[in-house]
Amino acid sequence: MSRIGKIARRTFLVGSAAIVGGVAFGYYMYKRPVANPLLDDLAEGEAALTPYVRIDGDGITLITPRADSGQGAYSVQAALIAEELDVELDQIRVDPGMPSPAYYNTALSTEAAPFRSTDDSFAANTTRGVMDALLKFLGMQITGGSTTVPDSFEKLRVAGAVARETLKAAAAQKTGANVADLKTAKGMVELPGGGMLSYEELAPIAAGLNPVNDVTLRDPGTWRLVGKAMERVDIVAKSTGTQRYGIDFELDGMVHATVRTNPRRGGMMNGFDAADAREMRGVIDVLQISNGVAVVADNTWRAIQAANAIEIDWGPAPYPAEMDAHWQTLSDSFDAELLDSRNRDDGDVTAALDAATEVIEAEYRAPYLAHAPLEPITATVLAENDRIDVWTGTQIPRFIQTNIAKIAGLDTDQVFVHVLMMGGSFGHRLEDRVVREAAEIALQMKGTPVKLTYSREEDTTHNDTRQIAMARGRGAIKDGRVETYDLGIAMPSVVGSQMGRQNISAPGPDLQIVAGAWEQPMSIPNYRVSGYRAPELAPISSWRSVGASTNGFFHDVFLDELIHAAGADPMEERLRLCWHDASRKTLEAVAEMSNWGSTLAPNKGRGVAFCMSFGVPTAEVIEVTNTDSGISIDKVWVTADVGRVIDPINFENMVQGGIVWALGHAINSEITYSDGMIEQQNYYDFEGMRMFQTPEIMVRGLENADQVRGMGEPMVPPAAAALSNAIFAATRQRIREMPMNKLIDFV
């Protein structure tokens, strides 16, 4: 076979290539297809028609490389492939596959570029193209930033179409029929005379063909799956208790481990005494790891009990020991020398404030928050001389591959990461500390599989939390309208902290400091949003919606304060200010859903909030009742525009879950430090939303936007703001700090 033929057989065009990316990095290099990783170890009679479709005599496997933490990512990815491949979801298996540069995330460039999602200028698109090219060359296989759907929407349908047309070509070769006369349905190629050939029997022939890359995607009017309510591929397993997660993984001869590391994050371990622990039942060994100690036992419970019996001398924390100092650091960070970004600076804010008759000022606070997923954090590692296998739930499999290779002194292709289903993440699985520690233990016990499980207390007290943040607003009104808006936000750098643990230096401003604030589509004459990078404090990480999780609260509550000072209607003034058509329609829809403007019973109040985050305009209205015992959250209405709703049932479920997540943390939760250590230990002192507190939640997905977006996070930023605004409407008490139960009771 010619070299050209071999290249065609082993590669696949991941997606449409932006010319600007080629200009920056070399057009040929950028356009060059990526290698198909499934071809590395194909069995006889098996075909890997693209990096996403593997077929053998036992059936069809669809590769779904974006991680599933309960958000339905596997189902969405499978449906996009199956739509064009002409198979039903009950005919296929899903497999996250091995880490590979072929699975780089094409949608991350949108959040990485310093342009509003509504900016379609040449400069914005050029920068996005350059970022996309860089991400391709780095092979950034990451799940996060609500990018699974925008990353997959075209790419996976193309993969399904390429596989479909290649199978038709195989059928034509087998039968002599004209390809144009062939059709496909339910995993079969239909022949002109009425005969049928299954994909499985065509796979050996298709394996010898060059993929048919010149394909036409189906018209949306013919879609069978996309846009329709569908049964998720994991629904039976989850409904019957047979779904296997990382915590369920087992290997023959496996031992169990847990760890204790310095609760003063980044502090040293001065020494330990494990004499009592070594004598406890079931303990196999006590091992030292980086900045801590591990106990290996015959089951997890015994390992945890023994770990708790170890006496350890911990060194001090490298950050302030008490919370007052953390808040003071933020307060001191509103300084010109710490200005990190000012991407929004319309009009002349300083002159307008100087000329204003009255300047309205307010300060807002948002605390550290833990991720606290339901599934305990765990990883299983088997280390051998020339190979390491890792089994875990993760959003960053290629980072794990690289980091474990460094720890073990191996090449990355000697590290095999088997990605497992996750029972929640919320950003937690963007960290890989548990895998690194499991590898350290396994390398001291080569040939023995080691399953490391954190106790709930170890996980909570060592969580790389959501950022702590503070905002200060100054504004003015004129003629019953919002005229001047000035918001400063101070927080440590999430990107700097998180990427620092991956030994990556992130240059330039951290856009997460102002995310969910500076890009709002509001036409305020004098409008400024400034981000101040506070000095590094306790370790922080991505938490569902990242910077927007705090900034959506800051930005909209201050806007609401200005609107009330102007004597304007909160909905009507937001609509007047909003210049973006799709965003206006979310506000109009939520106003209609909630019957905004109708008369409310005594002691009731409604609040509205809007936030554009991850390119998704999201509007929410919350209705509360001020009872003798406290605030009752009665109803929530949500509208969001993602351009295309892939599965309306999953969309509704995800939004409802996100609202419960957001409101529960807003009213009940915080992480605090004392003596350099996190004070909260478990769910009993880090509560989510209780069942009796949960409101009725009505959801409407819109499809007016011109780009397809994801909905994993955008419902979170406006929720706390809508609640604060509703509480003000019902009580005239303005809540500017979370958790809100420090200031007001909830029932």
Image (cartoon, rainbow, N blue to C red):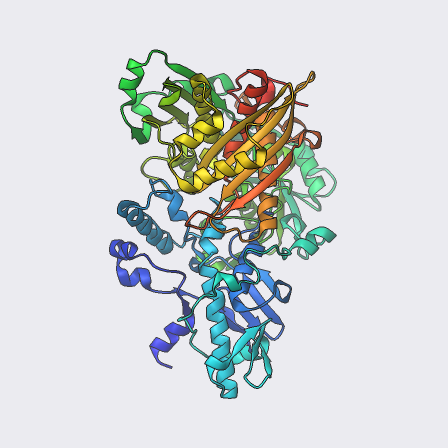
- Asked whether residue 404 is in view, the answer is no
Give the percent coordinates (x, y) of residue 74: 57, 55
Give the percent coordinates (x, y) of residue 152: 47, 56
Instruction: Answer with left or right where residue 152 lies relative to residue 334.
Output: right
In the image, residue 740 sits, relative to residue 595, either above or below, namely above
Residues 135 and 281: in front is: 135
At a point 51% along the width and 32% down the height, the residue shown is 718
In the image, residue 407 sits, relative to residue 477, either above or below, namely below
- Asked whether residue 734 is in view, the answer is yes
In the image, residue 526 sits, relative to residue 642, either above or below, namely above
Instruction: Answer with left or right where residue 48 lies relative to residue 600.
Output: left
Q: Which quadrant is the C terminus positioned in? A: top right
Mark count: 0
Give the percent coordinates (x, y) of residue 186: 60, 71
Q: Residue furthest front?
A: 598
At a point 59% along the width and 19% down the height, the residue shown is 730
Residues 66 and 429: in front is: 66
Give the percent coordinates (x, y) of residue 499: 42, 40
Q: Which quadrant is the N terminus positioned in? A: bottom left
In the image, residue 383 sits, relative to residue 371, either above or below, namely below
Residues 464 and 508: in front is: 508
At a point 26% along the width and 53% down the height, the residue shown is 24
Q: Residue furthest top?
A: 357
Residues 241 and 127: in front is: 127
At a point 51% along the width and 53% down the height, the residue shown is 66
